[in-house]
Image (spheres, rainbow, N blue to C red):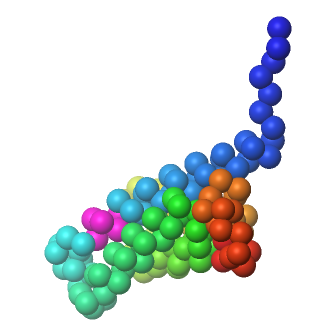
Amino acid sequence: MTLAEIKPKILNDVVFMGLRSAIGVIFIVHGIGKFNPGFANFLGSLGIPAEMQIPIALAELVPGILLIAGVLSRLSAALLSIIMLGAIFHVKGAQSLTGDKGFEIDLILLASVLVIMIVGPGRISLAQIIKKMPRCLH
């Protein structure tokens, strides 16, 4: 009987692709939701100008797409980490880890984008196909 063996390097790359894809989908969905007019009112209640609605929505949507594609992943993850720090400290006030206004999901997303920022996109990505890109931009 033969055993199926998965090489650790291939498994790591598949895991990084899965992490990038999951995080990318989450931010795409959240970014699209921020184009609703109600989000501008929510920003006003936080003391943020309503004109920031489109830049904030695009700051989640575009990096989410880039994460899934695996190009400019480190820069996208850096931008998303700033977004998540704003969500934790400005929106939720870092009051409680769980419960109402809990920031546990935001903290998980922050940790995930920090992993992507440090490790990079992995070998299953457009950045790997486009080998002329500097490594810091992967």
Picture layout, residue 130 above or below residue 83: above
Residue at (28%, 71%) from the top-left corner? 34
On whether residue 108 falls in the magenta region, the answer is no
Q: Nearer the viewer, residue 50 or 136?
A: 136
Q: Which quarter of the figure is the N terminus placed in?
A: top right
Can the viewer see residue 127 in this picture?
Answer: yes
Q: Is residue 37 left or right of residue 89?
A: left
| Count of number-bearing discs | 0
Can the viewer see residue 113 in this picture?
Answer: no
Q: Nearer the viewer, residue 127 or 3?
A: 127
Residue at (61%, 52%) from the top-left corner? 17
Q: Nearer the viewer, residue 81 or 3?
A: 3
Quarter of the image where one finds residue 36 = bottom left
Q: Is residue 63 left or right of residue 114?
A: left
Decide whether the magenta segment is chiefly helix, strand or loop.
Answer: helix
Q: Nearer the viewer, residue 84 or 53?
A: 53
Picture layout, residue 92 above or below residue 30: below
Q: Is residue 104 left or right of residue 118?
A: left
Q: Which quarter of the figure is the C terminus placed in?
A: bottom right
Quarter of the image where one finds residue 81 = bottom right
Give the image location of residue 79, x and y in percent.
53, 78
Give the image location of residue 106, x and y in percent.
49, 63
| Range of magenta residues | 30-34
Residue at (35%, 84%) from the top-left corner? 55
Residue at (72%, 78%) from the top-left corner? 134
Give the image location of residue 64, x and y in percent.
46, 65
Give the image location of residue 60, x and y in percent.
42, 71
Picture layout, residue 67 above or below residue 44: above
**The residue positioned farthest toward the left in the image shown:** 37
